[in-house]
Amino acid sequence: MVGPAFPPKTVRGLRTLANSGSQSTETIHSNSQIKNIMMPEISILAILAAAIIPNLVGAIYFGPLFGKTWLASLGFTAEDMQNRNEALIYGNAFLLSIVIAFFLKINIEMFHKDVGTTGELVFSSFHTFAHGALHGSIFAMTLVIPVVVCLGLFQKQGAKNILLNTGFWLICFALMGGILDFWS
């Protein structure tokens, strides 16, 4: 008889919440069982859909909605924005948005941990667009917006520009979080 590729791991206390405080032990014999406990499932399509959000929202937000206000807050005109390498700008923005979406998904799922009825650690226990939008908004308000405000202050940007940027990222993170949480 061939044994497991590694010694069995014992996970204690996983059933504590499910069984009214009773301690239990569960033996795990395979790499896939450990992976399911340690890492939530991630949909690549959800990551890509969420990653396109900043480009789509930015095209509207910094275009017809607040484009003139944003340019004025930077001291630019529409002519100043001509002759840019749009493919480079939007391509890199999309690649960086993939990184943001991936780690936002991980963050959301780490808050979704629960203990199942048989004692296993369960990810993704509550999935709605609104719940994900809440997680995305909280992430934006506690991490992204403070960074944007600090950068704006050190770069001597005006309050209008800082507010426009923080509003943009709050909307993006709320929408991204909603998509990532709903589409699991």
Image (spheres, grey):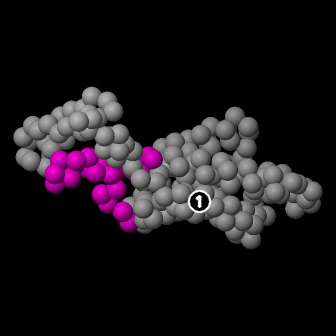
Q: Toward the viewer: 176 or 170? A: 176
Q: What is the x, y in percent for residue 47?
A: 54, 57
Q: Main secondary structure of the magenta part?
A: loop
Q: Residue furthest front?
A: 1
Q: Toward the viewer: 36 or 116? A: 36
Mark count: 1
Q: What is the x, y in percent for residue 15?
A: 15, 44
Horizontal arrangement in the rendering, residue 45 relative to residue 2 (left or right): right
Q: Toward the viewer: 141 or 54? A: 54
Q: Residue at x 26, y 34 (%)?
A: 3
Snapshot quadrant of residue 38: top left
Q: Residue furthest top?
A: 7
Give the extent of the magenta segment.
106-128
- Give the residue number, with chain letter if any, for mark 1: 48
39, above or below 171, in the image: above
Q: Residue at x 65, y 48 (%)?
A: 96
6, above or below 177, in the image: above
State the quadrant of the C terminus.
Answer: bottom left
Q: Give the structural element (helix, strand or loop) at label 1.
A: helix
